Image (cartoon, grey):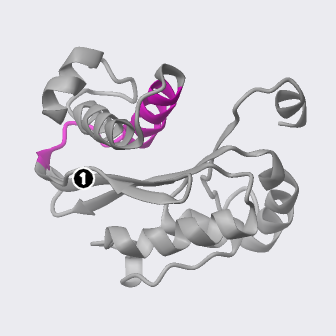
């Protein structure tokens, strides 16, 4: 990350706490050294709490998360690490193994954006939704898209990913744009 920042590269870090790897305390120690070099941070409330020590006020188990509760988490991240320009996450309400509600949100340069909620999204495979969200954000940043387009595209692209087996999103840009509309 240091080398990337020295070269002017925009960096992205995906919080993904793994209890088999380390404790929350150790993760937070390491992340204090990492965070000054992060431009785009992707992570849900649970991972943000365990890896950064920033708590959200949510229901037990992080189900049915209100997008506004994530806003406070994102604002705390940016207050602690002003170098972070984008903080985003996916919000999933797993109603059943087949039907989920899906929405994505981000804080971008101090403003909060959220996609529409995809209600009763039929799930073929849950894997890859978060990575598709992140890649949608990155694509839009590279293309210079406005923030609302970014979150709408990332939401549509990641929702489409749930219709494919495996963690590879086979959707085309045009398909995501149709879903956005």
Residue 162 in which image quadrant? top left
Check the picture and name the quadrant holding the N terminus.
top right
Looking at the picture, tell me which residue is in the foreground, 76 or 172: 76
Instruction: Indicate left or right for 74 with 90 as reference.
Output: right
Number of numbered labels in the structure image: 1
- Give the magenta part as a residue range: 121-141
Residue at 19% from the left image edge and 54% from the top image edge: 117
Q: Residue at x 62, y 53 (%)?
A: 15
Q: Position of residue 176 (x, y in %)?
A: 23, 26
- Secondary element at image label 1: strand
Q: What crowding class fits label 1: few (fewer than 14 Cα within 10 Å), some (14-19), or many (20 or more)?
A: many
Q: Magenta region's main secondary structure? A: helix
Is 133 positioned to the left or the right of 9 in the image? left
The residue nearer to you, when weighing 168 against 2, is: 2
Q: Position of residue 54 (x, y in %)?
A: 63, 75
Q: Position of residue 158 (x, y in %)?
A: 32, 37
Q: In which quadrant is the C terminus drawn? A: top left
In this rendered view, identify the residue nearer to me: 146 or 178: 146
Residue drawn at 39 percent across, 77 percent down: 61
Which residue is disc 1 drawn over? Answer: 102
21 sits left or right of 113 in the view: right
Magenta stretch holds residue 135: yes
At a point 64% along the width and 57% down the height, the residue shown is: 18
| 155 in the magenta segment | no
Horizontal side of residue 18 vs 169, given as left or right: right
Q: Could you tell me residue 69's position as x and y percent?
A: 41, 75
Q: Relative to 66, say whether 38 is above or below.
A: above
């Amino acid at each position: 990350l240091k080398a990337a920042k020295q070269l002017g590269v925009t960096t992205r870090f995906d919080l993904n706490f793994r209890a088999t790897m380390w404790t929350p305390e150790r993760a937070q120690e390491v992340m204090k050294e990492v965070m000054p070099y992060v431009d785009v941070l992707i992570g849900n409330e649970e991972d943000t709490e365990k890896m950064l020590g920033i708590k959200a006020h949510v229901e037990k188990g992080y189900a049915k998360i209100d997008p506004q509760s994530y806003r406070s988490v994102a604002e705390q991240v940016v207050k602690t690490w002003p170098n972070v320009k984008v903080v985003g996450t996916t919000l999933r309400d797993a109603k059943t193994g087949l039907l989920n509600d899906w929405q994505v949100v981000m804080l971008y340069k101090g403003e909060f954006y959220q996609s529409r909620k995809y209600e009763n999204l039929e799930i073929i495979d849950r894997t890859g939704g978060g990575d598709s969200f992140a890649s949608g954000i990155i694509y839009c940043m590279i293309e210079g898209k406005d923030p609302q387009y970014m979150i709408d595209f990332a939401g549509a692209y990641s929702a489409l990913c749930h219709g494919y087996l495996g963690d590879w999103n086979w959707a085309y840009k045009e398909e995501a744009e149709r879903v956005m509309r």
